[in-house]
Protein backbone atom coordinates (compact mmCIF):
# COMPACT_ATOMS: atom_id res chain seq x y z
CA UNK A 1 0.00 0.00 0.00
CA UNK A 2 1.17 3.51 -0.82
CA UNK A 3 0.06 6.86 0.57
CA UNK A 4 0.19 9.35 -2.28
CA UNK A 5 -0.03 13.14 -2.17
CA UNK A 6 -1.39 14.92 -5.24
CA UNK A 7 -1.41 18.59 -6.27
CA UNK A 8 -3.08 19.50 -9.55
CA UNK A 9 -3.19 23.09 -10.78
CA UNK A 10 -4.83 24.26 -14.00
CA UNK A 11 -4.45 27.93 -14.94
CA UNK A 12 -6.08 29.92 -17.73
CA UNK A 13 -5.14 33.47 -18.65
CA UNK A 14 -7.20 35.63 -21.01
CA UNK A 15 -6.33 38.78 -22.89
CA UNK A 16 -10.03 39.59 -22.78
CA UNK A 17 -11.95 37.72 -20.12
CA UNK A 18 -15.04 35.64 -20.90
CA UNK A 19 -18.46 37.24 -20.78
CA UNK A 20 -19.72 33.98 -19.30
CA UNK A 21 -18.63 30.42 -18.86
CA UNK A 22 -19.46 27.09 -17.24
CA UNK A 23 -16.98 24.30 -16.59
CA UNK A 24 -17.51 20.74 -15.43
CA UNK A 25 -14.65 19.51 -13.24
CA UNK A 26 -13.77 15.82 -12.71
CA UNK A 27 -10.62 15.89 -10.60
CA UNK A 28 -11.85 14.39 -7.33
CA UNK A 29 -11.05 10.70 -6.70
CA UNK A 30 -13.35 8.43 -4.70
CA UNK A 31 -12.84 5.64 -2.19
CA UNK A 32 -13.39 2.05 -3.31
CA UNK A 33 -11.91 -1.43 -2.89
CA UNK A 34 -8.46 -0.35 -4.13
CA UNK A 35 -8.07 3.19 -2.77
CA UNK A 36 -9.07 5.34 0.20
CA UNK A 37 -9.32 9.12 -0.11
CA UNK A 38 -7.99 10.49 3.19
CA UNK A 39 -8.58 14.15 2.35
CA UNK A 40 -9.22 16.22 -0.77
CA UNK A 41 -9.87 19.89 -1.51
CA UNK A 42 -10.78 21.94 -4.56
CA UNK A 43 -10.07 25.69 -4.67
CA UNK A 44 -10.99 28.24 -7.33
CA UNK A 45 -9.79 31.68 -8.40
CA UNK A 46 -11.86 33.58 -10.94
CA UNK A 47 -14.81 31.19 -10.60
CA UNK A 48 -17.41 30.00 -8.13
CA UNK A 49 -18.77 26.51 -7.58
CA UNK A 50 -22.48 26.23 -8.41
CA UNK A 51 -23.02 22.68 -7.14
CA UNK A 52 -21.52 19.19 -7.11
CA UNK A 53 -23.05 15.82 -7.96
CA UNK A 54 -22.36 12.17 -8.79
CA UNK A 55 -22.86 11.44 -12.49
CA UNK A 56 -24.24 8.27 -14.12
CA UNK A 57 -20.77 6.68 -14.13
CA UNK A 58 -20.34 7.38 -10.39
CA UNK A 59 -17.81 10.16 -11.00
CA UNK A 60 -17.49 13.14 -8.66
CA UNK A 61 -18.42 16.25 -10.64
CA UNK A 62 -18.17 19.96 -9.70
CA UNK A 63 -19.92 22.55 -11.84
CA UNK A 64 -18.27 25.98 -11.71
CA UNK A 65 -19.29 29.34 -13.15
CA UNK A 66 -16.49 31.56 -14.44
CA UNK A 67 -16.67 35.11 -13.17
CA UNK A 68 -17.43 37.56 -16.01
CA UNK A 69 -14.37 39.31 -17.52
CA UNK A 70 -11.88 37.57 -15.28
CA UNK A 71 -8.36 37.63 -16.70
CA UNK A 72 -7.15 34.63 -14.68
CA UNK A 73 -8.89 31.35 -13.87
CA UNK A 74 -7.15 28.90 -11.53
CA UNK A 75 -8.52 25.47 -10.58
CA UNK A 76 -6.42 23.76 -7.94
CA UNK A 77 -6.90 20.53 -6.03
CA UNK A 78 -4.82 18.55 -3.58
CA UNK A 79 -5.13 15.63 -1.22
CA UNK A 80 -3.89 12.32 0.13
CA UNK A 81 -4.99 8.91 -1.13
CA UNK A 82 -3.98 5.45 0.09
CA UNK A 83 -3.75 2.92 -2.74
CA UNK A 84 -3.55 -0.88 -2.57
CA UNK A 85 -1.84 -3.00 -5.24
CA UNK A 86 -4.43 -5.49 -6.52
CA UNK A 87 -2.37 -6.39 -9.61
CA UNK A 88 -4.81 -4.51 -11.82
CA UNK A 89 -7.80 -6.60 -10.72
CA UNK A 90 -10.69 -4.46 -9.49
CA UNK A 91 -13.11 -7.37 -9.42
CA UNK A 92 -16.89 -7.26 -9.52
CA UNK A 93 -18.79 -4.15 -8.49
CA UNK A 94 -22.36 -3.12 -7.80
CA UNK A 95 -23.51 -0.88 -10.64
CA UNK A 96 -26.73 0.26 -12.28
CA UNK A 97 -24.94 0.31 -15.65
CA UNK A 98 -25.47 -2.93 -17.62
CA UNK A 99 -22.35 -4.48 -19.16
CA UNK A 100 -23.67 -4.06 -22.71
CA UNK A 101 -23.20 -0.28 -22.38
CA UNK A 102 -19.45 -0.85 -22.32
CA UNK A 103 -19.54 -2.93 -25.52
CA UNK A 104 -20.96 -0.07 -27.64
CA UNK A 105 -18.41 1.77 -29.79
CA UNK A 106 -18.29 5.57 -29.69
CA UNK A 107 -17.20 8.00 -32.38
CA UNK A 108 -13.73 7.98 -30.78
CA UNK A 109 -13.36 4.20 -30.44
CA UNK A 110 -15.10 3.05 -33.63
CA UNK A 111 -12.60 0.78 -35.44
CA UNK A 112 -11.67 1.08 -39.10
CA UNK A 113 -9.46 -0.90 -41.43
CA UNK A 114 -6.23 -0.07 -39.57
CA UNK A 115 -7.43 -1.39 -36.22
CA UNK A 116 -9.02 -4.44 -37.81
CA UNK A 117 -5.76 -5.19 -39.62
CA UNK A 118 -3.71 -4.73 -36.44
CA UNK A 119 -5.72 -7.29 -34.42
CA UNK A 120 -6.36 -9.73 -37.27
CA UNK A 121 -5.70 -13.24 -35.99
CA UNK A 122 -5.60 -12.14 -32.35
CA UNK A 123 -8.05 -14.06 -30.17
CA UNK A 124 -9.73 -12.13 -27.35
CA UNK A 125 -11.73 -14.25 -24.97
CA UNK A 126 -12.01 -14.50 -21.19
CA UNK A 127 -8.32 -15.38 -20.91
CA UNK A 128 -6.22 -12.79 -19.11
CA UNK A 129 -3.16 -13.61 -21.22
CA UNK A 130 -5.03 -12.55 -24.38
CA UNK A 131 -5.42 -9.02 -23.02
CA UNK A 132 -1.77 -8.82 -22.08
CA UNK A 133 -0.94 -9.81 -25.67
CA UNK A 134 -3.24 -7.07 -26.95
CA UNK A 135 -1.64 -4.52 -24.63
CA UNK A 136 1.84 -5.48 -25.81
CA UNK A 137 0.76 -5.37 -29.47
CA UNK A 138 -0.63 -1.83 -29.16
CA UNK A 139 2.40 -0.70 -27.16
CA UNK A 140 4.70 -1.94 -29.96
CA UNK A 141 2.54 -0.47 -32.71
CA UNK A 142 2.57 3.16 -31.51
CA UNK A 143 5.28 5.56 -30.41
CA UNK A 144 4.48 7.80 -27.45
CA UNK A 145 4.65 11.34 -28.80
CA UNK A 146 3.07 14.54 -27.50
CA UNK A 147 1.38 17.25 -29.59
CA UNK A 148 0.58 15.05 -32.59
CA UNK A 149 -2.87 13.95 -31.46
CA UNK A 150 -5.50 15.75 -29.36
CA UNK A 151 -8.59 14.82 -27.33
CA UNK A 152 -10.68 14.53 -30.50
CA UNK A 153 -8.30 12.11 -32.26
CA UNK A 154 -9.99 8.78 -32.91
CA UNK A 155 -8.44 5.42 -32.09
CA UNK A 156 -8.40 4.61 -35.81
CA UNK A 157 -6.56 7.84 -36.67
CA UNK A 158 -3.98 7.24 -33.94
CA UNK A 159 -3.23 3.73 -35.25
CA UNK A 160 -2.87 5.11 -38.77
CA UNK A 161 -0.44 7.81 -37.64
CA UNK A 162 1.60 5.46 -35.44
CA UNK A 163 1.82 8.06 -32.66
CA UNK A 164 -0.16 8.98 -29.59
CA UNK A 165 -0.35 9.69 -25.88
CA UNK A 166 -1.97 7.71 -23.08
CA UNK A 167 -5.55 8.54 -24.10
CA UNK A 168 -4.87 7.25 -27.64
CA UNK A 169 -3.32 3.99 -26.41
CA UNK A 170 -6.34 3.58 -24.12
CA UNK A 171 -8.93 4.30 -26.82
CA UNK A 172 -7.29 1.77 -29.13
CA UNK A 173 -7.33 -0.95 -26.47
CA UNK A 174 -11.01 -0.22 -25.79
CA UNK A 175 -11.83 -0.26 -29.52
CA UNK A 176 -10.20 -3.69 -29.93
CA UNK A 177 -12.03 -5.18 -26.94
CA UNK A 178 -15.40 -3.85 -28.11
CA UNK A 179 -14.68 -5.12 -31.62
CA UNK A 180 -14.73 -8.59 -30.03
CA UNK A 181 -17.95 -7.82 -28.11
CA UNK A 182 -16.17 -7.39 -24.76
CA UNK A 183 -17.07 -4.68 -22.20
CA UNK A 184 -14.27 -2.13 -21.87
CA UNK A 185 -14.09 1.35 -20.37
CA UNK A 186 -11.85 4.42 -20.13
CA UNK A 187 -10.29 5.45 -16.79
CA UNK A 188 -8.64 8.77 -16.01
CA UNK A 189 -6.51 9.36 -12.95
CA UNK A 190 -3.11 10.11 -11.49
CA UNK A 191 0.12 8.13 -11.81
CA UNK A 192 3.15 8.37 -9.54
CA UNK A 193 6.22 8.70 -11.77
CA UNK A 194 9.86 8.16 -10.84
CA UNK A 195 11.68 11.15 -9.31
CA UNK A 196 8.36 12.94 -8.62
CA UNK A 197 8.30 14.43 -12.10
CA UNK A 198 6.08 17.42 -12.83
CA UNK A 199 3.34 16.27 -15.22
CA UNK A 200 1.34 18.27 -17.74
CA UNK A 201 -1.73 16.04 -17.87
CA UNK A 202 -3.62 13.35 -16.00
CA UNK A 203 -3.05 9.74 -16.98
CA UNK A 204 -5.42 7.29 -18.69
CA UNK A 205 -5.76 3.52 -18.89
CA UNK A 206 -8.40 0.94 -19.78
CA UNK A 207 -10.41 -1.66 -17.90
CA UNK A 208 -11.98 -4.74 -19.47
CA UNK A 209 -14.52 -7.07 -17.92
CA UNK A 210 -13.19 -10.63 -17.66
CA UNK A 211 -15.48 -13.46 -16.57
CA UNK A 212 -14.25 -14.94 -13.31
CA UNK A 213 -12.23 -11.84 -12.39
CA UNK A 214 -14.49 -8.85 -12.98
CA UNK A 215 -12.93 -5.56 -14.11
CA UNK A 216 -9.19 -5.68 -14.86
CA UNK A 217 -6.99 -2.69 -15.71
CA UNK A 218 -4.41 -2.31 -18.49
CA UNK A 219 -2.11 0.68 -18.95
CA UNK A 220 -1.29 0.19 -22.60
CA UNK A 221 0.94 3.28 -22.85
CA UNK A 222 3.29 1.80 -20.24
CA UNK A 223 2.59 -1.87 -20.99
CA UNK A 224 1.71 -2.70 -17.36
CA UNK A 225 -1.33 -3.36 -15.20
CA UNK A 226 -2.20 -0.58 -12.71
CA UNK A 227 -0.75 -1.00 -9.22
CA UNK A 228 -0.47 1.15 -6.08
CA UNK A 229 1.00 4.06 -8.07
CA UNK A 230 -2.36 4.66 -9.76
CA UNK A 231 -5.25 6.76 -8.42
CA UNK A 232 -8.60 6.34 -10.18
CA UNK A 233 -10.56 9.58 -10.63
CA UNK A 234 -13.19 9.12 -13.34
CA UNK A 235 -14.36 6.59 -15.89
CA UNK A 236 -16.52 6.51 -19.00
CA UNK A 237 -16.99 5.15 -22.48
CA UNK A 238 -14.06 7.24 -23.78
CA UNK A 239 -12.17 10.43 -22.92
CA UNK A 240 -15.23 12.67 -23.29
CA UNK A 241 -17.01 11.00 -20.35
CA UNK A 242 -14.00 11.28 -18.03
CA UNK A 243 -12.43 14.59 -19.14
CA UNK A 244 -10.92 16.51 -16.17
CA UNK A 245 -12.33 19.81 -17.44
CA UNK A 246 -15.09 20.32 -20.00
CA UNK A 247 -17.39 23.24 -20.67
CA UNK A 248 -18.22 26.37 -22.60
CA UNK A 249 -17.06 29.98 -22.51
CA UNK A 250 -18.35 33.01 -24.39
CA UNK A 251 -16.39 36.10 -25.35
CA UNK A 252 -12.86 34.76 -24.74
CA UNK A 253 -9.85 36.23 -26.56
CA UNK A 254 -6.34 34.69 -26.65
CA UNK A 255 -6.72 31.96 -24.06
CA UNK A 256 -3.51 30.52 -22.58
CA UNK A 257 -3.53 27.25 -20.61
CA UNK A 258 -0.98 25.70 -18.25
CA UNK A 259 -1.25 22.50 -16.19
CA UNK A 260 1.01 21.34 -13.38
CA UNK A 261 0.60 18.00 -11.56
CA UNK A 262 2.87 16.76 -8.78
CA UNK A 263 2.50 13.33 -7.16
CA UNK A 264 4.68 12.06 -4.35
CA UNK A 265 4.73 9.16 -1.90
CA UNK A 266 4.33 10.18 1.72
Image (cartoon, grey):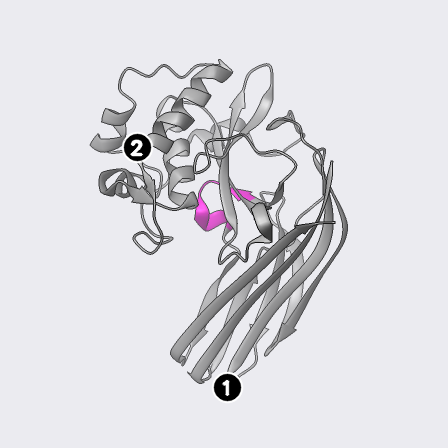
Farthest front residue?
195
Q: Which element carries disc 2, helix, strand or loop?
A: helix
Asked if residue 197 lies in the magenta stretch, the reply is no
Residue, disc 2: 141
Name the foreground residue: 6 vs 42: 6
Which residue does the numbered mark 1 point to in the structure image?
Answer: 69
Apparent side of residue 48 relative to residue 217 in the rendered image (left or right): right
The residue located at (52%, 27%) in the rendering is 99
Relative to 171, is 260 above or below?
A: below
Identity of the residue drawn at 74% across and 52% down = 80
* Residue range highlighted in magenta: 235-242
* Camera sees residue 177: no
Which mark lies nearer to you, 1 or 2? 2
Q: Is residue 240 magenta?
A: yes
Q: Do the residues labelled 1 and 2 touch (CB within 8 Å)?
A: no
- Place of residue 197 in the rendered image (x, y in percent of width and height, measured from the top left): 55, 54
User: Residue 117, position in %: x, y?
Assistant: 23, 25
Q: Which of 38 and 24 is in front in this view?
A: 38
Q: Is residue 86 left or right of residue 221?
A: right
**Disc 1/disc 2 C-alpha distance (Å):** 46 Å
Query: In the picture, which quadrant includes the N terminus?
Result: top right
Amino acid sequence: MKKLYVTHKTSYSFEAGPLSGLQQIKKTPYSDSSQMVLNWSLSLKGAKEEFSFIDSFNNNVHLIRIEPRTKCLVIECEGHVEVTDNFGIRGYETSTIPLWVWTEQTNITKPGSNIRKMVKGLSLKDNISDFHKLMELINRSLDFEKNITDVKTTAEAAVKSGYGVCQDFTNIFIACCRLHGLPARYVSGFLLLENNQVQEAMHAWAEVFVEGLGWVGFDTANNVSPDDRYIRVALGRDYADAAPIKGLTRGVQNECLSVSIMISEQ
